[in-house]
Amino acid sequence: MIKYKNFMANNLRDRTFNLALLVIKLAERLPMNPAGRNIADQIIRSSTSVAANYRACCLAKSKRDFINKLKIVEEETDETILWLEIVERSGLSPLDTIQSLKTEATEILHMIVASIKTARKNMHQTSNQ
């Protein structure tokens, strides 16, 4: 099995894991009315998926598999940001908590998008040689 890791893998692995933990803590503080429960379930699902799928990227069997797994991370990170924005605009949690989580999720999203672009570029360069 070939492992494809970029130079930020361990850092990004830790950041995606910590994002999931912080979102779980946020979700636990949401009100347990119908909206709060639904949002808590969704945001926990998407944020833990970011961490789990990034971890899977680190065990990709090929460059193509690596890129496909990164695309899942991209989608789940974007979904997490969506749920954070819903929490923010609905007033279900203090803004300072949400803003720091949105900033972290957005930074992770930017790194994932950059990694996808780099991996695609490298894959095309390798196939053209």
Image (tube, grey):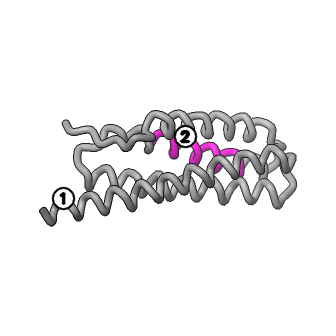
State the residue at coordinates (59%, 57%). 79
Q: Contact (CB < 8 A) between labels 1 and 2?
A: no
Q: What are the residue bounds of the magenta stretch?
A: 38-53
Q: Which residue is mark 2?
A: 16
In the image, residue 123 lies at what x, y percent? 24, 59
In the image, residue 76 lies at what x, y percent? 53, 53
State the residue at coordinates (33%, 56%). 119
The local crowd at label 2, few if under 14, some if 14 to 19, many if 20 or more residues have their Cα within 10 Å, is many
The local crowd at label 1, few if under 14, some if 14 to 19, many if 20 or more residues have their Cα within 10 Å, is few
Front-most of 101 and 127? 127
Q: Residue 42 colored magenta?
A: yes
Determine the image quadrant of residue 120: bottom left
- What mark, if any, has residue 71 been given in the picture? none
Determine the image quadrant of residue 78: bottom right
Of badges 1 and 2, the one in the foreground is 1
In the image, residue 109 lies at what x, y percent? 55, 55
Q: Main secondary structure of the magenta part?
A: helix
Q: Which residue is mark 1?
A: 126
Q: Is residue 90 left or right of residue 116?
A: right
Q: Is residue 121 left or right of residue 80?
A: left
